[in-house]
Image (tube, rainbow, N blue to C red):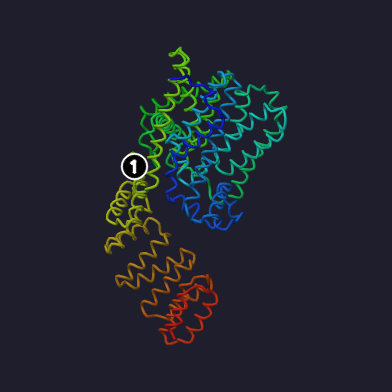
Amino acid sequence: MPQISEQDLPTSKWFRVAIICVSVLAAYGNSIRGKFAFDDEVLIEARPAVHGFDIFGLLDSDRPFLLLTFAINYAFGQLDTTGYHIVNITIHMAAAITLYLLIKRVLTHINFADEKYSNWVSLSIALIWAVHPLQTQSVTYIVQRGESLCGLFYLLCLLLTFSASTATKHRGWYQSAVVVCCTLGMFTKGVMITAPLTILLFDSIVLRSAWRTIFRRRGAMYGGLLGAALLYVLHMKFNCNSGTALLETIDAATPLEYLCTQAIVIVQYLKLSIWPQHLCIDYNWPISRDLMSIVGCGLIVVSLLATAVYAVLKKMPIGFVLGFFFLVLAPTSSFLPILDVAFEHRMYLPLVSVVTVGVVGLFFVLKTLVTNETWFERAYVSVIAVVSLCLILRTHYRNDDYVHPEQLWESAIVVAPTNARAHFNLGFELQMQNKLDDARGAYRRACELNPNDIRAFFHLAAMQHQTGRHDAAILGYQKVIAMSEKHSRAHLNLARLLEETSQFDLSEQHYRQAIDLAQNDPGFVEMYGNYFARRGQFEKAISQYRIVMARSPTYVTVHLNLALALQKLGRSDEATVHLKRASRQFPHEHRIQNQIAKIR
């Protein structure tokens, strides 16, 4: 076997970039078939600001730049998920290429090895990071574009800082670009708030810049980074009505309990980085009070953290690698008790540190064990190739889970069998597939695991209603109302069910409560009108329909229902006049034309 050398790759840099791109496509290409999931529907499908490019509506969010990218996707493909997935894969590919260029320049700057080996190591790190199965949630789950896009901006900040430090021309432009990328990253996801400190450590430790040099030559840049952080904080305080996950704290844990639990979670992240088996979209991780687990995992985390601090003080590059891991995880994995304890997408950037340590460690171990250069090169390339291929295959199959939501939630339950939220989501997917008995079982299990889960009890009652178990459904809706008296949809569904069982007085009472709680939602009022129409009380029905028309004249069905009620009262001429008026308002609505023909 001939010796592998740089000369064997005539287009070396572009060849390595092509390897990264092809590998990412092989690992994530099948994700394009995936559909919207729950969070996708909330953030994209049900958000008018995304549909209409409403800038002020986008700004009324903790992640306006992320929503802007979704608005662009929606403008081109509406709710067709293909374009969203293509953009997600492209962002991840760009992040991998940025990581490759960053590490290549850093390794050359610190004289890691000769250029050939620096190229190999930088390609290996970027490749393994890009195709690792732990990244699937950040790439394939559409709304987790926030994680990958923020990661891209984070890496661009470091790469541009390197250029600002080493370039002989256009340093000001590079510094401005750092501030712009950092700002966009913060308005993509809040974890970017740690970037200014990370960049400062990178400048000091990796680029070996003296403090005087940093503040004399790049003081304006760091001032801009602090300004971006202040702007983001002010935006969150004054302009954002929908709080970020970083602000959604849980009352069930003290900061100390959360910190102890995070020691276990971080060790779990490290395990999955090394052996990515039994991945889970939603761990619903409980607060841990197991002293042995806390002490054991705590010792590992404290040892790594102490090593990072020592290396940072000594200005060793490994200090930045370890510090990067902890800094990026700090907003979600420290002492602030946020809503969800563990999610795999939080390892999107920290995985860089784990892969870097692993690849560099492999390089030096093989270099020590295999003294013959030719055999060393063969061994190194073989190991990296085998590891990369295995990871690509594992990621490809993991993406199949995301393409089939039922399979995704079943795999989550295998990993976390007591996760009530996973059982609920499985029930929802089964219900969408009309597997009603299985869905009812999943909802019932979710209720057993979490007796306070209103959603699960509501959907279970709805399933009982749908399958004709009226007594069980009535009890279910009543339980939901007992848990939350302001649950308007439970009142509405109970009203319809009581109507079906001829309990009209109670039914009308719950209709009125539902309308009051829903703040006179036009859809609720129309259903109330339909209730009167079914009972033959057409004057009351007409009164409700006119309320709907006054508040929301674009409801086509209310025009048809009003015409039918008028016709039932023998007022056909009035019904025809109304429908002709509606026909001018909705010229392409064939149902109105058909109804006019029927009256004639």
Q: Is residue 180 shown above or below 74?
A: above
| In-image side of 530 versus 105 (left or right) | left
User: Residue placed at 54% from the left, 21% from the top?
Assistant: 116
User: Residue placed at 70% from the left, 23% from the top?
Assistant: 212
Which of 470 and 216 lies nearest the eye of the viewer? 216
User: Residue placed at 61% from the left, 54% from the top?
Assistant: 55
Residue 72, horizontal then vertical, whole percent: 57, 52
Quadrant showing the N terminus: top left
Residue 27, horizontal then vertical, whole percent: 43, 38
| In-image side of 473 versus 31 (left or right) | left
Q: Is residue 365 visible?
A: no
Quadrant showing the C terminus: bottom left
Give the residue number, with chain letter if any, for mark 1: 411
Instruction: Please tell me whether mark 1 sits on a helix, a strand or a loop.
Output: helix
Q: Is residue 512 visible?
A: yes
Which of 443 and 432 lies nearest the eye of the viewer? 432
What amino acid type is highlighted by mark number 1? Ser
Residue 264, horizontal then vertical, whole percent: 41, 31
Q: Residues within 10 Å of mark 1 (few under 14, many from 20)?
A: some
Residue 299, horizontal then vertical, whole percent: 42, 23
Q: Is residue 12 shown above or below 491?
A: above
